[in-house]
Image: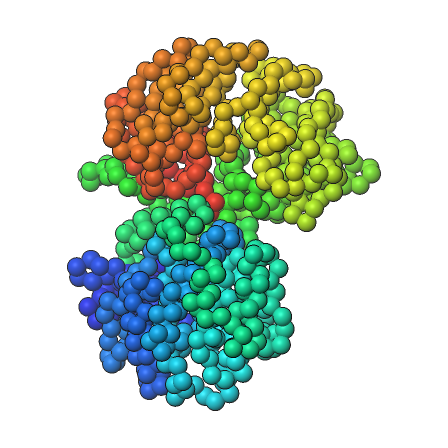
Amino acid sequence: MPTPLTHDDPVTLGPYRLVARLGSGGMGTVYVARSAGGRTVALKTMHAATATDPAARTRFRLETDAARVIGGRFGAQVVDADPLAETPWLATEYVLGPPLDEAVEAHGPLPEQSVRALGAALCAALGQLHRSDVVHRDLKPSNILLTAYGPKVIDFGIARAIGDDRLTRAGAAVGTPAFMSPEQATGQDHDAAGDVFALAGVLVYAATGHAPFGHGQAADLLYRVRYAEADLSGCPAALVPLLARCLAKEPAERPTVAQLAAQLHDGGGEFADHLPDGLLADLGRRAADVWGLTPQRLPAPVAQAEPSASTATAGRRRFSRRGFLAAGGAFAAAAAGGGGAWWYRGRASSSPARKAPRQTRNLDAMWQYGGGLDVLGWGLVTPHHANGSVWLALNATAARIDPATGQAHRVLIAFNWWQSAVENGRLYMLNRDYDGNGLSTAIATWDEKQEYEAPTSTRFADTTYDIMPNQMLCVSGGVAYVAVGHGKAPADHGFHEAQTWTLRAADLKTGKTLWTKPLPKRSSKSRRRHFLAAKVVGDRLVTFQETAGEKVHVVVRDTGSGAVVWDRPCDADEPDALGSDIAADGTRLYLGGAGLRALRLSDGAQVWATGDGQRYSPPTLKNGVLYAVGEGLGLRAVDRGRGRTLWTEDTLEADQAYTGWQPVVGTRYAYYRNGLQLRAISLASHGLALTYKSAAERLHVDAQANLVIGVDPQWLTAYPLE
């Protein structure tokens, strides 16, 4: 991701003005730059010391030639270059996509269909190089950029013509050890078959998240590349024989790129059709981000007093790119929970001085915090507000976030408490404790004075504490409702057919379990917890429960005994949408799906239904009005009493209205996602008032901090709640 320029970086190179840094290596630095006409490019240049080496300059010129050979279809299109300048530089198109290694780290290994499409496209790219008698020699995940239209191969710094060894010292291994071919590892000639070997390594990484020969010291890697069998564990079974052939030690035993492509994919469909949704959303975010980049430069280090608070604040508000904070002239990335970053935009100034007109479209969020918010594949975390902070529980870590700035100013280490709930501003979490017979599941709470998680007297006997789907449903009236399992904890700590599961209610004051009810067994393949959402309404515990057969039911229980009052199937094309806050009042439950419906809490009977054939998001209940997002319709307000439409958003731009989550309703605006924007709809005029850049899949309200908090697999994003 782009970072600010340093005081040592030049202002311009050729006709381009530098905007930000993209990265730096042993040979040079890559920048984001813009032409006088506004075109954004990636500009690679050589370090001044390296530029004095004639061989290095020749390599740079050959890299420019190789980039031109592969062209804009399979690589970054060369826009301009001056390899003969005092400081040689190369300008290419700015590719709006992440490197493959970043994509896998952020979103996990790719599914088989994605790996096949990626491999076939890379075969086409390498085929174009090979037909021009050029080999890449350094194909690896970081040199492959993913876009919605296909992968692009970059960094031809050690590419050369087949058979040309003028710039390679005899016996020297040139490349990246983890993805070298055996012949390359021994300094021998690396031809097209060597690129096939490297490509197979890339596909193994894409499918599993690990390189075929592991990691470690270069010497160990080179030995394993030459003599050890490739580690194909985790690869889709159908791909293993093909990848094994590509990773043969003898070049002659490997298929050509044309043969490999034919066995990987039939070429049907768009490349984007084969990518997972989370990765596609990331591509959209990056496309939006590049237009907001503005030149920022860190000053030279000084050994003087720290800058004033006013200077720090100004620095924060100037720089608004994800992952970075310019504060008081110092660049910082705040990491938490195994890797997190945040950026802060700041609220509008309240100064009485004359203000510029308020912008209303494509606004930046206030701040973002991230680093992976899908906990081990068990779904997106839910933020909670307690003790003046936004809490984000991430399995064995937690981030305590300042709601004003987004800065995670404290990171806590606890055990497996990604499940938490809040009542009356107090944070409760699932944890572990000794119950006299060993470790079991327990409930802890945050002690603000002692600044640590303190155990309560609530423990659950005959439970296995380290099963990931253990669940804190909610806390209400001093009673905690939990779903807990007992039995084998498999390697992924998920469900297992041998486990037994119970729903329990416990008094947090006495620690006494009030009642226990059995829950159905779950398949080891299931990745959704027993309950998608739960809420206490009067003397009823209202739940959306996934039952046997992976079907979702509305199950309403008596809070005093746990007995089922009524149970009926739930219309849920998108079950994850039911994780929204349940819309219910003292007498009725309100549902979305194929039409809006109201059910009696007492017996589940239908009170009314819109019957309009329109598909809706789960609704939000606010001041007696139901608000829901209609597919292709936008926001609609409905009378809760009879289901009568009160008003519908005045728009022709709701073709991407997101019905996978409920809208958030403030005092002036209602918010929902449409495409890659968060729309704020005026409750007075019923028209569009504001839009924010957003890829949030879920929206939560932080009423104490007046925030709309969006969550996607990578980022927690805050917007003003008005």
Residue 87 at x, y percent in the picture:
28, 77
- At x 20%, y 57%, the residue is 38
Which quadrant of the structure image shows residue 681? top left
Question: Can you see residue 629?
Answer: yes
- At x 29%, y 51%, the residue is 292
User: Looking at the picture, does residue 340 appear above or below residue 635?
Assistant: below
Residue 105 at x, y percent in the picture:
50, 55
Total number of numbered discs in the rendering: 0
Nearest the viewer among 236 and 2 is 236
> Residue 439 vs residue 492: left or right?
right
User: Looking at the picture, does residue 623 appear above or below residue 96?
Assistant: above
User: Looking at the picture, does residue 32 appear above or below residue 274?
Assistant: below
Residue 509 at x, y percent in the picture:
69, 25
Nearest the viewer among 187 and 238 is 238
- At x 30%, y 41%, the residue is 363
Which corner quadrant holds the C terminus?
Answer: top left
